[in-house]
Amino acid sequence: MAFLVLALLAASTAVSCRSRAREVVVYLSIDQVFTEPILRDFERRSGVKVRAVFDTEETKSTGVLNRIVAEAANPQADVFWSGDPVRPLLLVKRGLVRPYASPNAAAVPPGFKAADGSWTGGAARARLLLVNTNRVKPDERPRSIRELASPRWRGQTAIANPLFGTTTMHVAALANAWGEDALKAFLVQLKANGCRIASSNGEVKRLVASGEVAFGLADTDDAAEALREGAPVEVVYPDQDGMGTLLMPTVVVPLRGPHPEEARRLVDHLLSTAAEQELVDAASHIPLRADVNPPLGGKRASELRAMPVDYSRVADTMERLQPWLREWAGL
């Protein structure tokens, strides 16, 4: 009888362990509406339960990242799926990543992944100029980021506050490309030129779509939303005859979490052709892979002159610029 009880306890423990092992925890800073269907598809295909923790709109790109750092002594997340390629590098520097070179990463261009598998890029957003076609004639369309500060467009342009979101990454990338003094001079010129400093890229989209400004700096997904709404807008990929357009891939980061085998399986899925195609279709992102079709009217990354970027260096520059940007923004 005692032997039977011990056997039943052992079997129960084994089942319980297997049950716990058949799950994976992913933290995300990409919108839930776009990513949840991809995660549910992974569950159906793999039989592995996904527990997802999403950033809120107010803490986008920083909330779950700070949580991963806070949990360093007792990691809870197995994978971080990030909406930008810069902030995850803070996790790499802190030793919170368990590198994994997925076979599906082979199709990702070298500039959008780490050779050791510590991070791998996927469908990207671009920083672009959104132009109101009622206010700007075809032969007057802006072609460069620098035109935001042109006297020709005084009081007629907009950008999101560079203290937050993708604009932070953009100004840091420009600082690395131009030099920090040149970047600061450019931002001072923007204010002197009456550029509207909006609360978000979505607000920039609204200002352009309504005709309150002639053009503004926003992201691919904001432009796609304006076009779907039938707004009188046109997309310009800036600096195609110069330094190129800034691309911001989504990034998959394997972490030192409690489910390494399941984490590798999820990473494989998130970096698959099917998953990237789904994110491109749902969020109007730019495909990095040659075997993923671009959204209607969109482009693949290979069809654009991309701004050369060292994302690790951008991360350092972002941190260094914060005090000056706060002063510039009056905060």
Image: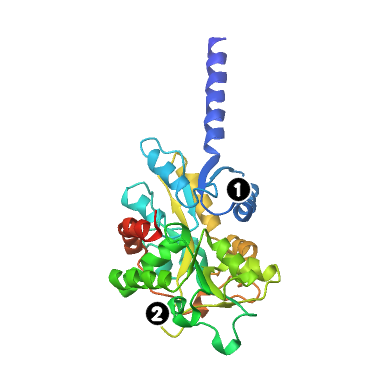
Percent across and percent down for residue 326 are: 37, 56
Where is residue 195 drawn, in percent x and y?
47, 70
**Number of other residues with Cα within 10 Å of mark 1, as a class: few under 14, some 14 to 19, many 20 or more:** some
Residue found at the far right of this picture: 230
Nearer-the-camera pick, 65 or 123: 65
Question: Do we see residue 255 in this rendering?
Answer: yes
Indicate which label's residue lies in the foreground, 1 or 2.
Answer: 2
Which amino acid type is shown beneath numbered disc 1? Ser
Q: Sequence-wise, which precedes: disc 1 or disc 2?
A: 1
Label 2: few (<14), some (14–19) or many (≥20) C-alpha neighbours in 10 Å? some
Kind of element beneath mark 1: helix
Q: Report the side of 319 relative to 82 (left or right).
A: left
Q: Which residue is mark 2?
A: 243
**Going by the image, does 327 lie left or right of 154?**
left
| 157 relative position to 173: left or right | right
Q: Is residue 144 left or right of residue 270?
A: left
Residue at 55 percent of width and 84 percent of height = 141
Q: Quadrant of residue 187?
A: bottom left
Report the Cα–Cα distance between label 1 and label 2: 43 Å
Q: Is residue 288 visible?
A: no
- The residue beneath circle 1 is 46
Up the image or down, 25 lies above or below 144; here it is above
Residue placed furthest toward the bottom: 139
Image position, residue 151 (x, y; %): 45, 81
Horizontal and vertical percent position of residue 75: 41, 38
The three-letter amino acid code for the residue at tag 2 is: Met
Mark 2 residue element: loop
Which of the pair 204/279 is nearer the observer? 204
